[in-house]
Image (cartoon, rainbow, N blue to C red):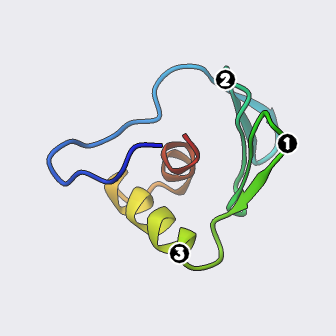
Amino acid sequence: MTEYSPLKRRQPGLGWKALRSGVYEHSSGVRVHMLGLARYPAGNTKSGNCWPESARLGRAIDEQGGNRKRGLMVWAL
């Protein structure tokens, strides 16, 4: 996972596809739900609703101009 850098704006990039309403999957196997959940190929999950992940997620959303979907994608990767 890359850390926040104020000099470089991260982007979700290519490889994302919509699975269901509010669920997106990256070609690497990472899945993101719009409620703030990420599931990784190893089976572990991460919630963006608890501290300190909520701060990281908030920063990623701000970095994407307030777009929650793109912010979640950047945060999960």
Give the side of residue 40 with respect to residue 57, left or right. right
Residue 12: horizontal and vertical position, in percent?
Answer: 47, 35
Q: Nearer the viewer, residue 67 or 44?
A: 44
Callout 1: few (<14), some (14-19), or many (20+) C-alpha neighbours within 10 Å?
A: few
Callout 2: few (<14), some (14-19), or many (20+) C-alpha neighbours within 10 Å?
A: few
Residue to which mark 2 is pinned: 28
Q: Which of the two labelled residues, at mark 1 and mark 2, occupies the earlier sequence position?
A: 2
Mark 2 falls on what kind of element? Answer: loop
Q: Which of the two labelled residues, at mark 3 and mark 2, occupies the earlier sequence position?
A: 2
- Which residue is found at the position 66% from the left and 23% from the top? 28
**Identity of the amino acid at label 1?**
Gly
Callout 3: few (<14), some (14-19), or many (20+) C-alpha neighbours within 10 Å?
A: few
Residue to which mark 1 is pinned: 43
* 38 to 50, vertically: above or below: above
CA separation in Å, label 1 and label 3: 21 Å
* 72 to 27, vertically: above or below: below
CA separation in Å, label 1 and label 2: 13 Å
Q: Are marks 1 and 2 in contact (CB under 8 Å)?
A: no
Residue 42: horizontal and vertical position, in percent?
Answer: 80, 37
Residue to which mark 3 is pinned: 52
